[in-house]
Image (spheres, rainbow, N blue to C red):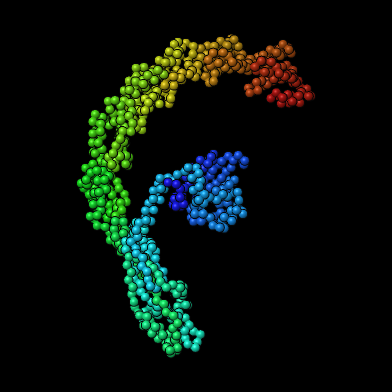
Amino acid sequence: MPWTQDIIMMAPEDVLIENVIELLKRMGFREYEKVSSKKDWGIDIVAIRDDPIAGMEKLVIAVHQKGLASSRDVNVFADLVDKYKADKGILISTAGFTKDAKVLISREYRGRIIPWDGEKLISLFHNYSLEPPEELLKMAESAKRKSEKKSPLNEFELDAPLLHEFSAQEVFKKVASFASSKYPIKPSGMSLQALSVTLSSAYIFSWSVEGGEEKDRAVVFSGEDIVLRATGDRKLSVPVTKALLNDSSTIQATERYIEVPISPSEAVLILKERAARELGVAEGKISIHERKKVYVPKLAKLDLKVGENTAKATVNLESGEVKFEISPLPDEYFIEKTEEIVLKQTGEEVLEKELKRDKGRVKISGRTRSFSFEITFNEYTGKPLSLEALLSDEALDELLRKTYPRGKVMNLEKGKKVAVADILLDDGIAVLEVDLTTGKHSEVRRLPSPEEAFKNAKDVIEGNFPLRNLEMSSYRVLEHKYLELTLESPDGRAVVKVDGATGDVLDYLVEITPERAKELVAERYPEFEITSVEGKDAEYVLKAENERHVVTIRLSKDGKLVEEVDRVLRKELAEKIALERAREIDEEASIDSISLNDNWEVEFTGKTKIGTLVLHRTTGEVIEENVRFTEMAIEAMYHEHLRMAFGEDEVKTERLTHYKDRGYINIKVSGAERFYYARIDTRTGKIISEDTAPIKGITAKLKQIQLDSKYK
């Protein structure tokens, strides 16, 4: 069935947008996307296409379904096109555009805003072979059937016009709205079965006073109810004018009743009497020029179908007052309806039931042989509001046993309406899905048996990891799709995830034992003895020793990655090498301390020299030396220097200051007639600088002060 204007107008906004997106796809747009929120964006679709002339074009599209699109709607959309920096905008108005909107688009937004009305959309859908969705066709067919349904109302022709308009449909809408405000009843669930209308006859007169200018129109409703000046009456002026233009009228109703409170002749007499009294003139002065009978709608009585119930309503057509009468449906109705629904849903008879009423709802709960159920109805319409029928645990167990007599239930996952069971069979594992609301079930897949999965998993793990003689210790089903096997041996364990569809290994976690870790490292380091094994998160850390080294080895817990992270010369061997080197420096040297940081760090002291050595942590090679003469050695060396250079036989050290951070010593020595000052390098023993000052003399004191400051 092709698209029509009626179908376009009927289409919900989301359905229309989906079809427009499909249309864009078929039209060759490169990208198209529905926005997340029309309320926030103001548009519905953003699209991009490659134009051979203009290049890439960005378009925004909005759907307007609230009547004709006006010029204001066009201006608002134009602002959105600018806001989102689009090249063009397509405004879809299913009902069309007002004349002002069309003129505005052609003058102000030509080429910038493209209008699509319902006819344009139908043409595009047809050209690109886009059919309306099935659900929309069903809606159209349903609407057509409703329009063709015979109305219970008859059309009555009246011999006079109506003073006030009467519409059966408007009266029904008024009653439906009133009922929905008082009861849990939706207007869409109500229908009209019968409507009777009571009309009252009345008369319109045109009158004037003889010899004067006073004239008007009057309405005589009854002997007591007369409106002398209807032209100035706010409620009557327009209805009187309209009534005088017509000679007859029609109404729709199932029945109509006419009341005649006064005859035409009586109406004339009463009018002239009232006019003469109020105007203060004789009745003979009152002239009647025209008389027209009219009917006044007084009362409407309605018989209504409200769901499975009935109701009555009366409407005072003059005051608008509505009275609505409806009684809740009886218990028997709900019990009978429950039995029908439960039987249809479960195929079983109701065995127990309990009925409760609360706030316009009827709740019936109970059980059948296999199901527990709860149904909620609208108390007034009888409409089922909710139904929950669930298979009992006992019935579910029985169903599983009957379906697989030789099976064993491994897992049973129960949701609100569906249960999924994993059943172990001789030739595999069946995954059974059970609809708990109806008891219907189906096998959705078949997984391989644990034994079959084990064979493949064993080959994969033993072929790639250092595990031997694996046996399956346990298994389970994951997500009703996969098998998880636990394999163990004295070497360790492996947890393997197997694809239930193919039997292939999807994932695994392998962990060897500490004993197996020692074996693997011993194979790699046959000349070493393993001294410790420490397990961490994903690895083992092992220590191993031989006569020369201590090594630290990291082994992944799956046994595949072996890495030597450290190799250190044994301490006693490092100390021996350090002592040999120290005695090469000073024959009487001894080791004070030895410690391992980045490398071996050694401190030694000799007779004439002290210092530190740094030995490579692995090879023992001396990679750094820091040797200094002792203070005593420096002092003795300088004394000897003074004897040899200056012939001083008796010398005395007055002051010796050691600047360790600077690597030198300042020394002051007194001789027979002079003071000797020197700065000596502690590493080489060489004199850096040297000065002398006389002990006595006129300038001696000044010279001493200067040198004391220099060699302080």
Residue depicted at x 37% and y 71%: 158
Provide residue 2's location: percent of width, then percent of height: 44, 46
Residue 258 against residue 65 in the figure, above or below: below
Taking the image as shown, residue 141 lies to the left or right of residue 422, namely right
Residue 189 visible at all: yes
Residue depicted at x 55% and y 48%: 90
Residue depicted at x 39% and y 48%: 138
Q: Quadrant of the C terminus?
A: top right
To which quarter of the image does residue 500 belong?
A: top left
Residue closest to the eye, 484 or 523: 484
Provide residue 617's location: percent of width, then percent of height: 53, 16
Q: How many marks?
A: 0
Provide residue 116's location: percent of width, then percent of height: 53, 50
Provide residue 544's location: percent of width, then percent of height: 45, 15
Residue pushed farthest left? 351
Residue closest to the eye, 427 or 66: 66
Residue pushed farthest right? 698
Residue closest to the eye, 292 or 594: 292
To which quarter of the image does residue 319 belong?
A: bottom left
Taking the image as shown, residue 57 lies to the left or right of residue 340, namely right
Residue 354 against residue 406 in the figure, above or below: below
Residue depicted at x 25% and y 51%: 337
Residue 572 visible at all: no
Residue closest to the eye, 275 or 541: 275
